[in-house]
Amino acid sequence: MRERRTVVTGIGVVAPGGVSRDRFWKAITEGRTATRRITFFDPTPFRSQIAAECDFDPVAAGLTDAECRRADRYVQFALACAAEAVADAGLDLTDAQRERTGVVLGTAVGGTMALEQEYVTVSDAGRHWLVDATLGGRFLYQALVPSSLAADVACRHRLHGPAQVVSTGCTSGIDAIGYAHQLIADDEADVVLAGAADSPISPVTVASFDAIKATSPDNDDPAHASRPFDADRRGFVLAEGAAVLVLEEAGHARRRGAHVYCEVAGYASRSNGYHMTGLRPDGLEMGLAVSAALKQGGIAPDQVSYISAHGSGTRQNDRHETAAFKRALGQAAYRVPVSSIKSMVGHSLGAIGSIEMAACALAIEFGVVPPTANWTTRDPECDLDYVPNEARELPVDVALSVGSGFGGFQSAMVFRRTSGAVAA
Amino acid sequence: MSARAVVTGIGVVAPSGIGADAHWRTVLAGTRRTGPLTLFDPSGYPTRHGGEVPGFDAAGYADNRRLVQTDRWTHLGFAATRLALADAGLPERAPDPYGYAVALASSSGGNLFGQRELQRLWGGSSRTVGAYQSIAWFYAASVGQLSIHHQFKGPCGVLVAEAAGGLDSLAHAARAIRRGTPVVIAGATECPLSPYALACQLRSGMLSDVADPERAYRPFDAAASGYLPAEGGAVFVVEELAHALARGARVYGEVAGWGSTHDAVHTGPDTAGDPVQYARAMRLALDRAGVPAEAVDVVLPDALGVARYDRSEAVALRAVFGDRSPPVTTQKPLTGRAHQGGSALDVATALLAFAHDTLPASAGPDEVADGCELDFLRGHRRPRTRVALVGARGFDGFNSALVLRGAAPVRGVHG
């Protein structure tokens, strides 16, 4: 059977500091940070009181009244992103094509925000263990099951292909795009709306990360709190957001004359089998995932133009992935620009992997690499080129992105520039 | 693309029993295992019955350190995975870690653990949660823990499609096997029976509030009144055929075909599921397996127990099979519906039926509802073609189907 290739033909983004693809790209290439004191609730009781919130208006984003009522915030993000991506791709599907168009979306914590808000109501603020179900909102079940994310997007765009949610924690966003790519490669779909969404900025999530001191306590200087690869990093900054890409079989895109951002050259995932939150210092499994993804695309280490790091800004992570890049790329690791946009948009758990893949596609498109903001002090154990503070113009032919998550998941994905002939 | 995915181990932890043998005995006897919920006092709820795993003692399957970090849903997953590995004759620790992966489905996560922590955060004096909330609640918790304990270090995954995802995880396993991972642990367990999760489910409008458990969950019956919720599910060792043969493993059957579609319509008080899309999922699965509709030996349907959904499932089956419906059997009334664990459990039932050379009689309907006239198995019967079609639907429009090709019956397996 002839190999089926996957290309990216549409991008939609809802990110802190940039609600829409263009605003997102402008913000991160200008090095602007979107981290701030939490405004959704009074964060005073918590150790970490900062987050990267989206200034998202569902009505302005074109959501219907019904969608606003039904959908939890993370689903609303995905609806906005999917609409933007579909418009960007110029998709105008026939009924037959809708049967071959799927939805694969990731989320780490799904409807946590709605579930917590509803819980406060049905339990009378934690007074009753046996909650009063009759006080719950009409869409409480949709909040419990994260499959609502894929369902709502499929309903909006009337898509009848395979639909599913991927929930591998903080690698969900890469894995969802990876699974979508596999569906296209295996001839199970021609087009897939793929991406991820999370809106975890609620007291229970903040308290969860407080309990293990994973998030930054830099409450006095939120704008500079996310400092990946900097010697003075103090943890990650919680965030929300979403991105959806239109993935399309290359021939399908070519026949309709679609603009192609790039091609999915490889995807791989390995688990470290080590610890739910701890990482092996040697970066072995992330390195293996990177090597496997590059091998799928027939890409040599020195052909990688840019690495979008996981770069969460925990000391453990930054050293782990620095080791992983050296392990997978050898000497080439020292020459490749590596940056973490989490320095600006924070860590939106499952969503960020897709937001970072959107950034990779845009880096290839525009020949600009976004920086690692807030980088001031070198960590001797993090000795790669982290593109400090200012975006860099350079041709990007191959962009690699990695993700690492609780549970030990390590995923890697490679996007490659397509020449005019690649879709043929 | 030629690698074939076969099931070599079955681990059942369900209301029907712990272990494949216990499940099979329950199925053969047609014993209803739903009853009053005991995990909490449900007296204030309109639905007070469900399926709980009888006599489940998590301490038999994981050490205390892991148990305190995890939700009951994960405990059930620990048990089902151990049972599946033992059944497959595989060691507790993967001998080739990167050749082993675990990809389960979960749509209710660690909700009991999560409710306890929400209670502490909102009802307690300090605004804190415990150190394990961040790793116990999220949907990837079970897979992460299993990956660590058993050293499954290949491409691990977690899928959600409400009740349909149990089938999707087996399809995903087959894809991973084709891509070079020889052993993938797939399936699902769930425990959506915390007071809060039950409250959430009640909002779906699909639960039965009939007080008599014998009459509460009756799919395709004129007295259908919704379903009873359940916990548990089934986990499988899915293995590349040559890998299984090389180590002399017993093969239950092949994951031969799969298909998934979406209705693109939300579930509501007036919807019934789209039989056109559901039928398409079944046809995709049959086509992928290379099996003509007339070769199907038995169908294990979704069997939601909501009249309009039962009718649309019958319509979908007629669309696929015409007037010559293959035998249909459902065991879900015996156990209740365990979200994605329930569709995985149907896969276990189908494979065990071939292993025991017996298609089990259907647990109802007693009085077939109008429009639901299918060839329900009224007694046990010998399989003929050994091809099973398992169907599952998920709330808000998910449809999945799986085609299993059963191996020859296993000598020495006792029914």
Image (spheres, grey):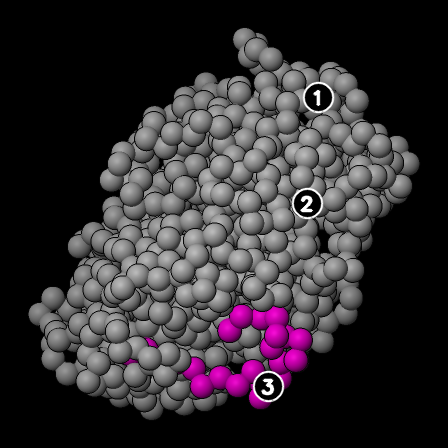
Do tag 1 and tag 3 residues touch (Cβ < 8 Å)?
no
Precedes in sequence: disc 2 or disc 1: 2
Residues at marks 1 and 3, CA–CA distance in whole angstroms: 54 Å
Mark 1 Cα-neighbour bin, 10 Å: few <14, some 14–19, many ≥20: many
Report helix, strand or loop for mark 2: loop
State yes or no: residue A134 in magenta.
no
**Residue underneath mark 1:** B359
Q: Residue A239, relative to residue A327: is it above or below?
A: below
Question: A391 or A407: nearer the eye?
Answer: A407
Image marks 2 and 3: residues in contact by CB distance under 8 Å: no
Give the percent coordinates (x, y) of residue A271: 33, 48
Q: The disc numbered 1 marks a residue on which chain?
A: B
Q: Where is residue B45 drawn, in percent x and y?
A: 58, 49
Under mark 2, the amino acid is Ser
User: Which label number is shown at residue A59?
Assistant: 3
Using the image, name the chain to which the residue with label 2 belongs: B
Identify which residue, A41 or B44, lies in the foreground.
Answer: B44
Type of amino acid under label 3: Val
The image shows residue B78 at horizontal and vertical percentages of 39, 36
Q: What element carries label 3?
A: loop
In the rendered image, which residue does mark 2 sit on? B208
The magenta span reads: A50-73
Q: In which quarter of the image is residue A388?
A: bottom left
Question: Does residue A388 appear anywhere in the picture?
Answer: no
User: Is residue B132 found left or right of A315 in the rendered image?
Assistant: right
Q: Are marks 2 and 3 on the same chain?
A: no
Q: Looking at the rendering, which quadrant does residue B318 occupy?
A: top right
Image quadrant occupied by the C terminus of chain A:
bottom right
Q: Nearer the viewer, mark 2 or mark 1?
A: 2
Looking at the image, which residue is at 91% across and 36% down?
A: B323
Left or right? Give the position of A40 relative to B160.
left
Please state which amino acid type lies under the numbered disc 1: Leu
